[in-house]
Amino acid sequence: MLLRSLVRGAGRFAGRSSFRNIATSLKTNPSSSSSYQETLLNVPETRVTAIKNGLRIASEDYGLPTCTVGVWIDAGSRFENAENNGTAHFLEHMAFKGTNKRTQRQLELEVENLGAHLNAYTSREQTVYYAKCFSKDLPQIVELLSDIVQNSRFGEEEIELERHTILREMQEIENNLQEVTFDHLHATAYQGTPLGRTILGPSENIKSIKKADLLTYVGSHYRAPRMVLAAAGGVNHDELIRLSEEHFGKLKAGYEEVPDLSPCRFTGSEIRVRDDDMPLAHIAIAVESTGWADADTIPLMVASTIIGNWDRSMAGGGHVATRLGQQAVKYNLCHSYQAFNTCYTDTGLWGAYLVTDRMKIDDAMSAIQDEWCRIATSCTDVEVTRAKNLLKTNMLLMLDGSTPICEDIGRQLLSYGRRIPLHELDARIDAVDAKTVMAAMNQYVYNHCPAIAAVGPVEQLRDYNRTRSRMYTISH
């Protein structure tokens, strides 16, 4: 997910347009900081209302002819155990296979006839069902989403067909080495905990999941207080409340048994999957960072932006601002690298992912860890200012359109319990200086045990204890 957790959003935007307006105002009057600040403040209100059963409705109205609306559910693979791991993702696949009211064909035809787009995804902590449509069709889409969430049929024939689809999907993901490496990183960093399991689950579970398992998961987790109905674009909030009361009002508010979200222990460790037939080594190294709502999240994002990303296809070549990027070019360290900061409710992974030649592994890993130690001990205000500006730009660009805005609303309501205004986030980024970054790096990175996942021809990857010893400098 980009820098994995880079505030895919924490803002709102101006008037009926998108963040392109902000970029335009900055371009036409670059010296006017007041214009930029005024633009951040001149945004539609994020209206949030909870109905009787605890379902929260959140929306932003831009007066557009289209909108995005969806249901964000506080349920993902983290809420599974070893026996039912993969159920949340299986449910996502089954959502569009028919309900008690609509067959799969009727569902697909209805969506296509409206010119709408229907989609879903599952993460480790959330499940999402959303649609993009004409604003005039909002009532039909809200009813359709409620039908999918509450009345999916889970037919035995459809389950068997989807079982094979998911198994094929697992094979495809095995060819995506970045995804494979990050799954291994979670497996070793959070070993023995729910965050260490994959979202898709093991193939043995996929082959054995039954209708009863799906119904049990829905009954346990698809409860109104753990859901947000979010919308952005051309949306009338009062109408959305009325529609939610009509179609989601019967959702259960209580629990027979409160779902357990026990802390997931981080373990400094490594996992290696050596394959000398592969042309390149894929390596991820990370330390435990913060959860979404922690105050240190912003300084760590700035630090991650200082490290940045680079690959050989970049037009600038060696003329990049990041020191690590310059070293990658000068010493031919790698084919690409990228910093990431993945946040969960109460924990996170802060680190870097690189793709390199087998004989450059030691040099590349040393360069990354040396840069971490440098930022922790001698970070400068100049590079922090550059990183803050880049972080703001990335933040604005990621919120360009009703779909990312809607996604941001739903995620923030579940993660923070509120929608963080863009001007507030801007102020929190501005408050970060070199001392703040160094303090965060010393608290979470410097002299801390990392988790490492390596896939490919990784013979040259040094022993874990040697890697651990590079997490500090003797002179500090």
Image: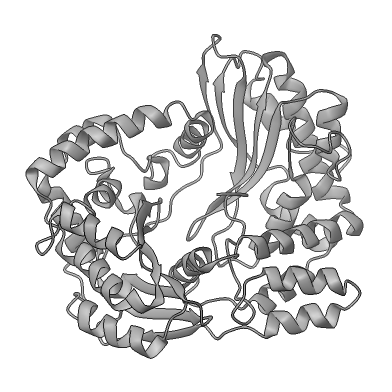
Outermost residue to the bottom: 238
Tally the numbered discs: 0
204 in relation to 436, above or below: above
Determine the residue located farthest toward the top in the rendered image: 277
Quarter residue 470 falls in: top right
Q: Give how far across and how far down residue 300 sits, in percent.
A: 69, 56
In this view, 4 is above or below 313: below
The foreground one among 213 and 16 is 16
- Looking at the image, which residue is at 84% across and 38% down? 316
Residue 25 located left or right of residue 249: right
Q: Which of 170 and 341 is in front in this view?
A: 170
Residue displayed at 42% across by 74% down = 231
Residue at image location 31% in from the left, 75% down from the top: 225
Residue 50 placement (x, y as % from top left): 35, 85
- Where does the image place residue 280, in percent across and percent down from the top left? 62, 18
Q: In this view, does 324 lie to the left or right of 264?
A: right
Q: Which residue lies furthest to the front in this view?
A: 113
Tell me if residue 473 can be seen: no
Q: Nearer the viewer, residue 133 or 419?
A: 133
**Quarter that holds the C terminus:** top right
Residue 410 showing in the rendered view: yes
**Figure colour scheme:** one colour
Q: Residue at x 41, y 86 (%)?
A: 237
- Residue 313 to residue 127: above or below: above
